[in-house]
Every structure is written in C-alpha cells, then in structure tokens.
Image: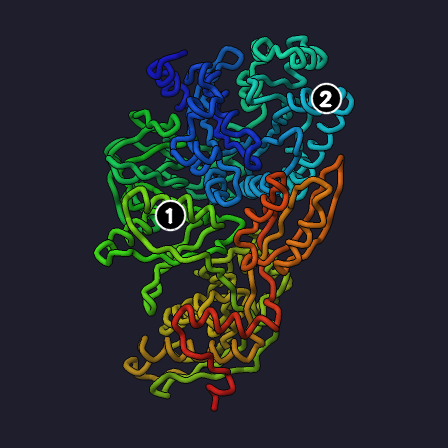
Amino acid sequence: MATTKDTMDRVKEVMTDPTRIRNVATSSHVHHGKTTLTDNLMGGAGMLSDKVVGDVETGMFTWFDEQERSRQLTIYGANVSMIHEYEGRDFLINLVDTPGHVDFGGDVTRAMRAVDGTIVLVCAVEGLMPQTETVFRQALRERVKPVLFINKVDRLIRELKLSPEMMQERFMKWIEEVNMLIHKYADDEFKNQWMVNVNDGTVAFGSATRKWAISIPYMKKTGITFKQIIDLVNQDKDDELARIAPMHKVVLDMMIQHLPNPKVAQAYRVPKIWKGDLNSELGKDMLSCNPDGKLAMIITKMVPDPHVGFVAAGRIFSGRISKGKDVHLIGLKKDEKIQQVAVYKGIQRIPAEEVVAGNIAAVVGISDAYTGETVCEAGTEIEPFEEIKHLFEPVVTKSVEPKNAMDLPKLINTLKQLSREDNTLKIKINQETGEYLISGLGELHIESKVERKLKEIGLDVEMSKPIVVYREAIFKESPETEGRSPNKHNKFTVIASPVSSEITNAMNEGIIPSEFEQKKKKSDVTENLVKLGMKSDEAKNLVMIHNKCMIFDDTKGVQYMNEVMELVKEAFVSMMDEGPLCKEPVTGVKIVLTDAELHEDPVHRGPGQIIPAFRTTLKKALMKSDLTLLEPKQNIRIDIPEELIGGVTREVENRRGQVQDIVIERGAAIITSKLPIADMFGFDATLKSITSGRGFYSMIAIVFEKLPNDLREKTIDVVRKRKGLAELVTAEEEEA
C-alpha cells in the first residue's frame, strides 16, 4: 500500500493540471453499494489495505460517524481524493461518497454542485429504485454527467441462477430505464450526448462486495468472457475474478475516459449555476477554469471540527486558495483570512500549500460560512452562485426545549451550527410561544442529525412528537382589497390570485426560482415568465418571489412608492412566512399591488405605519380568496411478497392513503401509493410487523394537496392551539 506521503506528492503534482482531474459523486438508492464501491476504489488506489476494504467492522472508510456503522448506511457522506494511473499518466479523482437514504438527500444535492460527473449505481436484482431517480434528477439539474455501474451481479448468478440470456435481458432493462431518466431530466443539449451504452464503456457490471467489475471495452482488451465470469462466481473463485478484473481498475478507467475534466465541464456548467456576466473577466476565468484568475468558490459542506470550529469544503471554479489569503464571503458581507488549506481523505485532511481551480478543497478560517456561500477575492463583490436547492422541502417538524433553562444558550448555538452543516434542516424560533422548531426531511433526518447530536454533547432536552408543517394557499382570485395604516394616512389596494400551474411547475423544476428579488426591469426570470404565458407588461412589474409566492407592483404615478417599497417587501415576506389561518407558510400566491395612497410627510409613512398597513391588506385579500390548508403527502413505493397485498393495502387505506398501482412480478408485489404525512408516523414499523420484516417502502416524491373540507376546521384549530393563537377571525368578522 502506498504511503500517504507518496499519495500526497502525486496529488499535489496532478491537482495543478485540470485536464487530469475528475470530480465525481456516487449516487443511488440506499444499500445499492456506494460506500463499498468507494472503499474498493480507495483500496485500489493504495489508500486502504485489501484486508479491510468493504468490511463493515474495519473498513467502510467514509463511515466516520458511529451511527453510520450501527445503522449500516451513509448519513454524512465524505470527500476522498485519490490517484489512479491510466495509460501511463496519473489522474486525480476527487470522489464524494453520498448517502442513499431519502432523509439525507440534502447531502447529495450539495455534493452535486461540487462535481462534474456521477457514477450511478443500480442493484442488478432490485433495479432502479425511487431514490436513485431523485438523486439522478438532482445531478442532471446541475449538469453533472453520468456513467452507470450495475452492482451485485453475483447475486443474479448465485441466488437467482439466471441464464446469460436472462441476465442480459435484465441489464438492458436497467440501462433503458436509466436512459429514459436522462432523456426526461437532462437539458436538451445533453439528452443524446449523455446516454449510457454498453458498447462504448459508459456502463460497467460487477460486485463491489466481491471486488470485481467488467465492461465491454475491458473484456475486449483482456479477452475475458462473460462465461468465464459466471464460471468463476459459481466456483466461489471471487479472489481470482478480482485479480483478473479488478473493480478499481475498470471503474476508475471508466471515470477517466467518460467523465469530463473541470476545464471541459465548467464551460457548460457555469452558465447554469452562476448568473453573472459570462463576458466579464471573472466569467471568462470561470468558463475556462483559470487557476490564475480571480477567486470564485462555492461552499458545499460545513464540517464541525473540535479543534478549529468548522471546516468548509467547496469547489473552486476560478483562481486559487492558500494559507494566509484574505477572502470575501458574499452572503455574510465580510472578509476573512484563510488559516489552513487541505484536500480530503475521508474525515482526514491532508494539508496543501494551495489548491487551484478545478479542485474540491477543505478550508479552515471561514467558520461563519454556510452551505451555498460564495467566496471571492477580499475587497470585491461578485454575483453569487445560484442557490443549492433540494428537490423536497422539510415536512416533518419537532419542537425542542432544554429541561434546564440554563442550557438555552447552548441549545440555540448548537441548533444554529446544525442548520449551517445541513441547509435542509430548518431551525425556527417562535417568539410568542418560546418554542424552538426543527424541520427536516423525515423522522430519521431529525433523529440522527439533531437528537443524536444533542445527546452526544450532553444536552438534556424535551422533544415533541413529530408535527406536520402545512401550507396555506388560495384557489380563487380575490376582489380588489383595501387596507389602511394605523394612522389612516396610508392606503394600499391589492388583488390576490393563485400562481398559474405552469409557473408553479417551473418553480418546482428550478426554471423559475422560488426565491428571487428583481433588481432591474428585465431579467432571465421575467423572460421565462413571458415564455410561460405571462404578459410582458405584467412580468416586468415583478418585485420579488418568496416561498413560491410572487408580488407585482402595478401602481402608476404613486408618489413616494419607491421610498416605501422595502417596507412593502418586508410586510409581504412576513405574511408569506406566516399566513392568516394558522401562521403556516403561504405558497403559490400572486399579489398584485394595484394602487396606493401615501402621506407626503415621511414621519407618517415609517415602518410602524407601512408594514401593518400592507400586512392587513394582504390578510384581507387572502381571506377573501378561498384560503385553505394544503397538507403534505408522500408518494411511496412499497415492496412486499405477493401474498401480503391485502393486509398492506388495508393499512394504506386506514391511513387515508390511496393505492395508485399494483405490479406483480415473480411472486413480489410493488404497490404505488399516496399517503398524508400526518398519518404516516409509525408506518415503517407497522409495515415491518404485518410483513414479518419482509416489506419495505421508498419515497418517490412529496406533494402538497388541498386538505379535505371535513378536516379543515379541526386541523386549523389544532394548529392554532398548539401555537397559542386566539380563535380565528373570518374576513367578514374583521371587516365588521
């Protein structure tokens, strides 16, 4: 095994040449072999002993957290830099091993911003599962190019005893399904270019556990036949198979041959993830991955460290970063000095003098940064990178409070730290009730990343049972609605209506941002709104988008409008964050400000007058627009033995769920269902119970749908009581 010094000398030599770098992330459904594959690649690169590779007890190098080993699944993911020799030259692979469980999908989303290519793993037995599609969709949205590895092929031979023809048929099915996803989610210019193909070597097959892999180009090169592979597996000669077809060689060769280097990738990725001027000096530096250009880096991971606070991991798109360098954090609007620079080897950081464009770096000295922060040269301002946005929103919430009031500052500090590590964890302080609310992607997300952490640091807290976060939404247009300021000297008139389905879908797909502030009359956003059917005159009046809600200024010749617009926006944001029904977030609402009357004396149109006036106007308009609650639902896939269909479908229906489809194949059933999250708590344990541990479910998507009318009043009352709110006043009562 090569020493760290040998490896690092080679890393330092290669990392200055972007043509010899590959930034790659693993992506797949949970338990399809990503971490075992990563262990194999590190072993092949001389960074791990063959004896521990893939061993749950001693290997799994990127499982650095104790609960990852106990649960046997990746929770945090990890960055690894390794060297691989290909055709006589050294190449640097910056690999990010990502989680597969849906509750930790935010880690995958962040990883995709840092990389240019992904190796998609599909289990040869199970095929494409829902989370594979989710993470693959995220990769393609970031213009990350895929290659495919079909894992656990040995199970088809040993357990299912499939003939070569049946195996080939199964492989072709999985490849076809992957290509359908590429065609569905990739940008038009890449739909055909990025299709995976057995013959060109963008597909490999093998067994990460048994340490062997094969591809058509490798078979042609070595003369190995598929019959030999089947015979060796059947004879339990896995070691011999791993010797003649080593996994690390086949897979790393595939990455180098078929995934782009940063110089190639940035030319088409930068226009997607950075909306600055591409013709500017910085724009050209980023497009060409110029190591001598101005610094442009995005933070994709914040890792706590007991010695230095936080370590920031990020992708450098232009320039270089070194110890002692002064940098500027765009979001925080502050300069900082870099204390250390390193590259990753799992949780270990290997110090480097400097790291240049095209690489993923570990940086100490910017502990206040957050995931998605843009870093540039000190004393300068640049257009920030696009927000790193996960496909799904947090839908499960728990309230937490310390048992000892003296621990409150420590609790607040820890919660803030956790939200900076993982931007899919949302922390909210309810000033009125004194509750501290934590929202995550699921129960496991909150349990493993919050509850476990609080326990580790000795914080004794009370955690509530899971709470569902609803959304407030409208289904018809309001009449023109007026509201006045407390001093009666200022008046606003608005119309509220639902955002069109075309624009809502565009926000869900990331074509239109769900958070945006208009800085000029014309932008990409206004152009896209026009393409989606909005009139040009209306689109140019866009003021901002928040929570997928939009506000437009359609006033004409109103004096002092520009002076109060920041206050109007503040009132809009606060109302969209906490709606009139029960202070749940408002979504999918379009507000058009049609008229206003403002007092000529600035004293009479300050924050204490304008903000309440506009909030009152918005509240009245929303209440007149059939305002109701949307509840989150999960579309799920349930895998069970065929004979258990009856019991499982009854359980789904008892939880207000809908069975949408049932597919039966070889004695196994796949049930596609939709269930309200409010009725899903404990579903996993119940499913395991009624199927004797043989059933499991996977999430396909989260959707928000109108709460049934018979549950509306009761749900509003329950939420209002939990939040300590008074009885709801209707629009008519308030007018009276």
* Residue 474 shows in the view: yes
Q: What residue would you read off at disc 2?
A: 161
The answer to whether marks 2 and 1 mark residues whose Cβ atoms lie closer than 8 Å is no
Residue 451's tag is: 1
Does 124 sit left or right of 625 as displayed?
right
The picture quadrant where one finds residue 651 is bottom right
Query: Which residue is rendered at x = 73% and y = 47% of the image?
Result: 662
Sort mark 2 into few (<14), some (14-19) or many (20+) by Cα contacts within 10 Å: some
Q: Residue at x 35, y 65 (%)?
A: 430
Q: Nearer the viewer, residue 534 or 217?
A: 217
Q: Nearer the viewer, residue 186 or 67?
A: 67
What's the amino acid at mark 1? Glu
Residue 565 can be seen in this image = no
Mark 1: few, some, or many residues within 10 Å (few <14, many ≥20)?
Answer: some
Q: Quadrant of the N terminus?
A: top left
Residue 88: x %, y % from top left: 50, 10
What is the C-alpha distance between the residues marked 2 and 1?
44 Å
729 displayed left or right of 133? left
Which of the two residues, 543 or 360, is positioned nearer the viewer here? Answer: 360
The kind of residue on which mark 2 rests is Lys
